[in-house]
Image: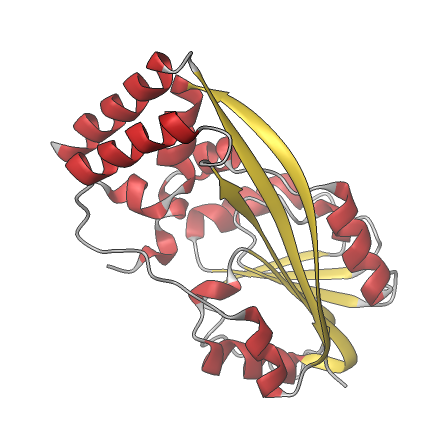
Amino acid sequence: MDFRKTYDQIPEKFDQWRPRYCDELFAAVIEYTKLEDGKAALEIGPGTGQATEPFLKTGCEYWAIELGENFTKFMKDKFSSYPRFHIMNGDFETYDFGDQKFDLVYSAATIQWIPEKIGFPKVYDLLKSGGALAMFMTLSDEKSGNEILYEKIEEAYRRYFRVETKYNCKLDYGNAVNYGFVDFHYLDWKRTRILTADEYVEYLVSTQVEHITLQEPYRSRFLNAVRDAVLDAGGRIMIHDTIALYLTRKP
């Protein structure tokens, strides 16, 4: 199964439940790249644009390449009022950008879907000399704030979580330096979310690819078990998020 278009089936729900990034992250990327009017940025797989507007507001020429047709339409409806907004519906791995070059190429939890032997060299070629690659994502910890509840949720996974295809997209972001990138460094920011039982279930089935594709009868059994576990624990689950940012540049 190709998971890459999973979220495109539910653009509104994905947009509602996907955690947002913090202002500090956007400020760090913009400062690192000195992004402004006269410069160009490319976003890989923007989805519903949760990491788009801060860059548009710099006045840069913004481009995006988006695989999902529904996401592409969502983005056009959302940002078409910006005169320097451009989006292509296509596959980054095979799309021909011609002579286009960018001061910034960035990914908000998307580049890990691309094999590094394809992704890193292609980004390198698309960047101007001195241009930057920014990769960021939200890493969620549901264990440390909920030890007993976490074990009950794990039991629900053991009993009912039966998916046809496992999500196995892994990327060592530090490997960018093996493809010519320099000045690699990492920043992060912490935050905490508290969700109700129903909110947590909606979050799972709107933002996690395996949960979206989980079929009956396992789907209902699993979700009911998770909901009941959270309700039994007081009706709330605490999630500790790490908003992680990797920055590097082309010499």
Quadrant location of the C terminus in the rendered image: bottom right
- Residue 176: x %, y % from top left: 59, 78
Can the viewer see residue 216? no
Instruction: Identify the residue at the far left of this view.
Output: 217
Quadrant location of the N terminus in the rendered image: bottom left
Q: How is the image coloured?
A: secondary structure
Instruction: Identify the residue at the far front of this view.
Output: 148
- Count of marks overlaid on the render: 0
Q: Residue at x 51, y 76 (%)?
A: 119
Horizontal arrangement in the rendering, residue 138 relative to residue 143 (left or right):
right
Horizontal arrangement in the rendering, residue 106 relative to residue 111 (left or right):
right
When the figure is inspected, residue 123 is found, relative to residue 76, above or below; the finding is below
When the figure is inspected, residue 117 is found, relative to residue 167, above or below; the finding is below
Q: Residue at x 88, y 61 (%)?
A: 37
When the figure is inspected, residue 117 is found, relative to residue 172, above or below; the finding is below
- Residue 66: x %, y % from top left: 51, 58
Horizontal arrangement in the rendering, residue 58 relative to residue 42 (left or right):
right
Q: Residue at x 33, y 61 (%)?
A: 168
- Residue 211: x %, y % from top left: 30, 40
- Residue 36: x %, y % from top left: 87, 60
* Quadrant of the rendered image containing residue 39: bottom right
Q: Residue at x 48, y 77 (%)?
A: 116
Can the viewer see residue 32? yes
* Quadrant of the rendered image containing residue 131: bottom right
